[in-house]
Amino acid sequence: MAWLQFGSAPWIVLVLVSGPACARPASSPTQAPAASVVAREPEAPREDTFSFVSTSNNDDAAKARVVESDGGDEVSGTFAVRTAAQAKQLAEGAVATQLDPKKVWRTSPVFPSSWPAKDRKVAVYFHGLAAHPHSMSQYVLYSAAFRVDVSLDDGSTTVVAIPKPRSLGTIEQTRPTSLETRELELAESSLVRQLLGGTATIGENTFWGYMKFVHEHPEIGRDLERRQAPFMKWVRKKG
């Protein structure tokens, strides 16, 4: 602070010195186990453009979402992955570098890696959507190009490239209704609980959200139902 005088009255002049702002260092992200990759096809050269993985986890309303309980018993034990959201996040991280950045990618619900289940693993599929040549609001949907298996025990991932994705038709990207979202989350939660050794509520079919998803998204739903035929047949019988 300095004093200056003009005439009879003193003036006070404040000199502010700017310096580097104090910033809290960002916390280091949790490192997921390294993903193993199998059956990968040679990749064509790609341009440096952004890629967006479309998933329910990206919706604003889904951030920090608490999944409704299916009413079953609590699962005991130490597991690296205990929710469908965690499994999807690991799957997306494992396959991210292999996704064509020129496409929009859609993440499937979690499914069992085998059925009847032989281990505590879930499978997540990735479908590519290419821009429609004659429409700004529509996309050309392709069959699943990748499957990622995620271990609930240790969080390890295995990426499987599915050869020769084919066109499934033209679709418009739409937001799921709150009812559809809630039913699917309940179904995924029930599956993860069962794979971890827990039990769901007896009576009501808490897996029905999978059938609801197939009904609401017939193009992608038929592709997933074909790939998960034993599990989907079991879900239908429970209904």
Image (cartoon, rainbow, N blue to C red):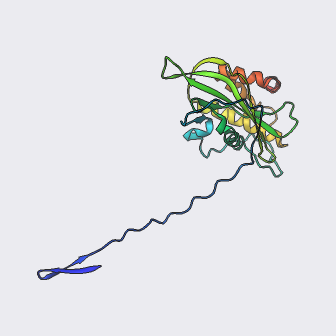
Task: Pick the residue in front: 163 or 18.
Answer: 163
What residue lies at 54% left-to-right and 37% top-to-bottom? Answer: 48
What residue lies at 15% left-to-right and 81% top-to-bottom? Answer: 9
Q: How many marks?
A: 0
Which quarter shows the N terminus? bottom left
> Where on the picture, by quarter, is residue 36?
top right
Residue 195 located left or right of residue 50: right
What residue lies at 59% left-to-right and 44% top-to-bottom? Answer: 63
Task: Pick the residue in front: 223 or 42.
Answer: 42
Task: Pick the residue in front: 195 or 90.
Answer: 90
Residue 77 located left or right of residue 166: right
> Where on the picture, by quarter, is residue 6?
bottom left
Residue 105 seen anywhere in this rendered image of the structure: yes
Position of residue 67 measured from the top left corner of the image (x, y, whole percent)? 67, 42
Residue 110 located left or right of residue 54: right
Residue 75 located left or right of residue 135: right
Task: Pick the residue in front: 237 or 51.
Answer: 51
Position of residue 97 measured from the top left corner of the image (x, y, whole percent)? 65, 38
> Where on the picture, by quarter, is residue 211?
top right
Residue 200 seen anywhere in this rendered image of the structure: no
Compared with residue 56, is residue 165 higher up or lower down, i.e. above or below?
A: above
Position of residue 233 measured from the top left corner of the image (x, y, whole percent)? 81, 23
Which quarter shows the C terminus? top right
What residue lies at 57% left-to-right and 58% top-to-bottom? Answer: 26
Position of residue 84 measured from the top left corner of the image (x, y, whole percent)? 71, 40
Residue sticking out furthest to the bottom: 8
